[in-house]
Amino acid sequence: MKQNARSIFVLALLALPFSCTRTLVPGDSKYLRMVGDITFDPKEDDPDFELCDEANAKQYHNFNQGFQYKGEKPALEKVFAKAYRSKMMLGETGLIRIRFLVNCKGKTGWFRIMGMNENYEPKTFDKSITKQLLQITKSLSGWKILPNEQAPEDYYQYLIFKLQDGQLIEIMP
């Protein structure tokens, strides 16, 4: 009896690799490489923006080199302090995240916006706010090139804007 159980167990182990096979062809999967990956949208994105290696763009949590902007966060905050024109808009409170890609040449593209209220529930902000934040973000020209041993790499970046009644309170990260 012990020998039979052992034989069945060994056969099951041998069959296991064949029962769990699946073929994933790059670019042929209905799933993104990682949660949150951005794919090109011809309605939204500049067709001239090119990634050097789209399949291997680094997520912001994949490299340990800090904020990748020349002059770091203080320089970025100066740009927004000078360019953002806030006006009192009651109820326009919460967070706006703009996520995008920086290519191996330090150029940006494929911007995506997500808004949320103070309870982290989805929120659509007034277009005058999101349009202005997006324009300023797109105009930023100080993104660093992410070095690699072989060649510079593409990477994801995000900015989160905290608003209180239309007033820009804080920029994160």
Image (spheres, rainbow, N blue to C red):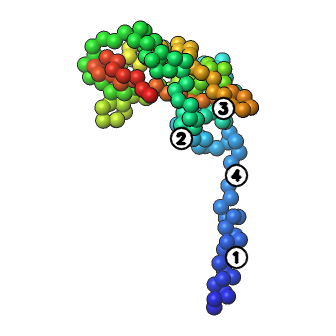
In the rendered image, the quadrant that contains the C terminus is top left
- Mark toward the viewer: 1 or 4: 1
Question: What residue is shown at x 28% (from left), y 16% (from top)?
Answer: 89
Does residue 163 sit above or below 31 in this rendering?
A: above
Residue 83: x and y in percent read 42, 9
Decide if residue 134 is in sight here.
no
Choose the circle earlier in sequence order: 1 or 3. Answer: 1
Q: Distance from label 1 to label 3 (Cα)?
A: 42 Å
Q: Distance from label 3 to label 4 (Cα)?
A: 21 Å
Q: Which amino acid does the dot numbered 4 rest on?
A: Thr
- Helix, strand or loop for disc 2: loop
Residue 124: x and y in percent read 37, 26
Q: Is the residue under label 3 in contact with that under label 1 (CB below 8 Å)? A: no
Q: Quadrant of residue 165?
A: top left
In the rendered image, the quadrant that contains the N terminus is bottom right
How many residues crowd mark 1 within 10 Å: few (<14), some (14–19), many (20+)? few
Question: What residue is shown at x 52% (from left), y 17% (from top)?
Answer: 71
Does residue 100 sit above or below 135 in this rendering?
A: below
Q: Which amino acid does the dot numbered 2 rest on?
A: Val
Choose the circle earlier in sequence order: 3 or 4. Answer: 4
Q: Which amino acid does the dot numbered 1 rest on?
A: Leu
- Mark toward the viewer: 3 or 4: 3
Q: Distance from label 2 to label 1 (Cα)?
A: 37 Å
Q: Quadrant of residue 28?
A: top right
Q: Which mark is residue 11?
A: 1
Q: Quadrant of residue 18?
A: bottom right
Who is closer to the viewer here, 109 or 82? Answer: 82
Q: Which mark is residue 154?
A: none
Residue at label 3?
A: 54
